[in-house]
Structure formats: C-alpha cells, structure tokens
Image: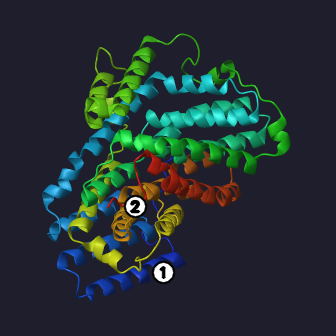
Amino acid sequence: MPPATRAPAPASSRTPLRPHHYATLLLTLALCALLLATPSLSLDARLTLLTFVLATAAWIATPVDDTYIALGAGLALTATGVIGSDTLFGTLGDATVWLLICAFVLAAAVARTGLAGRAAAFLVSGARTVRQLTHLTTAALVVTAFAVPATSGRAALALPVFLALAKALAGRRRLVVMLALLFPTVILLSAVATLIGAGAHLITVSVLFEATGRRVGFTQWLLLGLPLAVVSSHLAAEAVLLTTTRREDRRTPVKITTAQIQQHSDRPVTGPLASSEARCAALLGTVVLLWCSEPLHQVPPAVVALIGAVVAASPALGTVRLKEALGTVPWSLLLFMAATMAMGVALADSSAASWLMSLLPLSGVPPWAFLTAVVVVSTAAHLILQSRSARSSVLVPLVVAAAVGVGVNPVAAALASTAAAGFCHTLPASAKPVTLYSDLPGTPTYTSRDLLRLSAVLAPLTAATVLLFALAVWPLLGVPVLLPR
C-alpha cells in the first residue's frame, strides 16, 4: 500500500530562521562587500569568489537542493565568462563520472543476485562472542566498499542483514542498538577504502588534477585508503561497543546461525552458488583485480568498469537489465559533481584560491600543524555542511592552494581532508546512513544521546588516526608530507 501523501503546507507558512541562519547571512554579506571593495582582485577572481561564497551560504542556510545550488553556481560562472561552456559540460564526460556510473551498474548486478547477504551470513555466523560479532560485521561492511559505490547505497544494501541480526538477537536490546550504530559508523568510515566509496573522493581527485596536474588513480587511492579504512573502522567498532554496551553484555556468548538469517532473507544464504551468483562473483572479482593491477596493464579504471557494466547487463551473461541498473544511478549526485568540478576549475584558473590563501598567515607554519588544522576543520565541517560532497567542494580547493603555499604536499593534504570529512556521526541528520538506521519501526535503535556519546570518543579518535596516517604511514607509501624540492 503506497504511503499517504502529506498535504502541502499553506503558501504563507515558512520555516523560521534560526540564529545560525542570521549569522550566515551577515557573514555572507560582509564577505561579498569585502570582495567587491578589493582592488587587487581581477574581475574573474572576484566573480568566482562571490559565486563560491554565495553557493556555500546557500548550502549551509537554505533548504534548496544541493545540486540545484551547484548547477546555479556553474551556470553563473559560465554566463559571466569565468569558465567556458565546454568546461561546464565537459565535466560530465570526465572519466571519474563514468567510473561511478558503471560502478552503480555493477552494484545493481550484485544486489540482484544476493551475494552480499550470503557473504555477510558466512562471516557473522562464525561469531561466538560479542566482540567477534562486532569485528566480523565490521570486516564484512568494509568489503562492501569494493562492490557498492556511495555510502547510502551500501547502507541500503546492508539493512536487511542488520534486520536479520536484530531478529536473532531480539532478547538483547543493547546489542541490537550497538549493531544499529555500528552499521552506519563503519559504512561511513570505510568509504575511504576505494575511489568509488563516495562522490567526495571523485571531487577531490578532480580538484587535485586541475590544480596540480597530478591524478590519483584507483590503485594509488586503494593503497592509501584501504589501510586507513581498516584501522579506523575497527577502532570505531571498539568505540561503538564500549559506549553502547555493558560488561555483562560483552561477556555473554552469542550464537547466530545461518538458518536464523535465512528466515529474514528472500534469497538463499547457504548452499551452492546459483549460476547467476557464480557469474556475478567472477565478474566482480575480475573487475576489482583489474582495478588493483592498473599499473601492469595500463587500462584506465573507467574503461574496466565500463566493460564490467556491459557484461553485467548483457542478455547472455548478465544478471540485471541495463535500464533497471541505470535507474539506480544517482544522477543528481553526478550533476552535483560535474558542477562543483567546474567551480574548482574556476577557482584554480582565476587565481581566486591562491589569492584567498595569501591572506592567511601561513609562512613558518610547521607541516604537522597545518595538517592538524586541516584534519580538525574537516572533521568538524559536517556540523555546518551536511553534504559530504559539498564539504569537499568547499574545503579541498582551499586546502590544496594553502598546502602549496606552506610547502606541504597537496595530495597528502587533500586526502587527509577528505578522509577526515568521513566523520559525520554527531546528529541523526548528519549523514544519510545515520538517518536511515536511526528510525526503524519495530526494531530498537539509537537515540541522539547515543550519537553524542559516541561522537565525543570517535571524533578525536578518527582525527588522530587520519593525522597519524598522513604524517607517518602515507610517506612510506609514496605520498610524502612535504613537496619534493
């Protein structure tokens, strides 16, 4: 039965303005006046910064769709001649956009076969203690970053698995609440494992390429992001476990069988693989293997993904119709990415970002202090900008420009900012996966108080982990802290 539609609000009703809305409006007006009164700025740089400031204010303080704002900003930059129409429309043809489209087609094929539920059942059925269940679930969720792009898609795919676990643990409410909080937490923090884990990653790669000429490929991102995803996810799992359960909860054994999970799944979770499951598993494994071995065969990840998508939707070998698979692609996100990529080009080409960074007293700042500031600001940015992609669109161009001025490797700074921005757990509305698992009728779940208690531990823990990787681990993997002389 379709849900009842809500009657439209009267034309006179309006959402009351809150104090932060007024503060944002006043700050925006002040910044616009400052930019108009600055004689050292070129016209293109002035128009770019005005557009950037207005778009950011709209993202923060208005209910207007993020994509609509981004498209409006891109159109304004094109109409004023800051960028050409080829730049605006050409971003939709970027290889990273095609990579994401094809990855969603592959994800639709995987979801259609039920492979994800089978893999999850295989892992969690081996748990005998609460801590084992927690970390096996975490490991399973980290692996889904290779199969399903975007955190909201992974959250939706994992929801039936969580509901099955919740039914199996119906008599242990605190464990169910712990798992409800664990799923979105790990999904958000493990997204950094792959380039397709979040749209923000593709924006970061595009900004880096436009500003520095360096393109971070799928393999390099995997090398840098996967270890961080594994470490931060399992640390977060411990934080969730310790903040939502008691010692007696953790001491009591658990036993979840595949039969219990099968009761709540419409596809087999045990037994031999069906032919469609075997074909899909082989295809997904081949695609991931080719992605990871790009330096050997030199085939771009987008081309590999396109080949995989064509096979996944083929009449003979595929498991999903192309029309159905394309219906799962978040076209709004792709348009947002294209428009924000164009904004990044304008910031770089007009020298607006460089001028903005020249105002900051960055000379003499130690690299570790600069990276610490980047990580802290990026970790807290979700309190102002709820869209992860919008946060990267605002922060990464500025971080890249500032890093060059300080002598810090812009790749390290941009990746640290993007990874830290993956923390968005403070409020139920901070991220779509958190919202999805916060309201499940008939199933115990977490409250705002649970989120705040977890955030008090997880925010500094996540920031410290990202900073440790940027300063100590990534240099060993080929991304030094300082710019090469």
The figure's colour scheme reads: rainbow
Q: Is residue 152 left or right of residue 214?
A: right
Q: Amino acid at mark 1?
A: Ala
Task: Say which quarter of the image contains residue 307.
Answer: top left
Q: Secondary structure at mark 2?
A: loop
Expressed as whole percent of the image width and height from the top left, the position of residue 120 reads 58, 27
Task: Say which quarter of the image contains residue 269.
Answer: top right
Residue at 39% from the left image edge and 29% from the top image edge: 288
Task: Say which quarter of the image contains residue 268.
Answer: top right
Q: Is residue 55 above or below residue 332?
A: below
Residue that badge 1 annotates:
23
In space, the residues marked 1 and 2 are separated at their CA atoms by 37 Å
Q: Secondary structure at mark 1?
A: helix
Q: Do tag 1 and tag 2 residues touch (Cβ < 8 Å)? A: no
Q: Is residue 16 left or right of residue 166?
A: left
Residue 208 in view of the camera:
yes
Q: Residues within 10 Å of mark 2 (few under 14, many from 20)?
A: some
Expressed as whole percent of the image width and height from the top left, the position of residue 273 reads 50, 13
Expressed as whole percent of the image width and height from the top left, the position of residue 324 reads 34, 30
Residue that badge 2 annotates:
482
Q: Is residue 468 above or below residue 352?
A: above
Q: Is residue 56 left or right of residue 83?
A: right
Q: Earlier in the sequence, mark 1 or mark 2?
A: 1
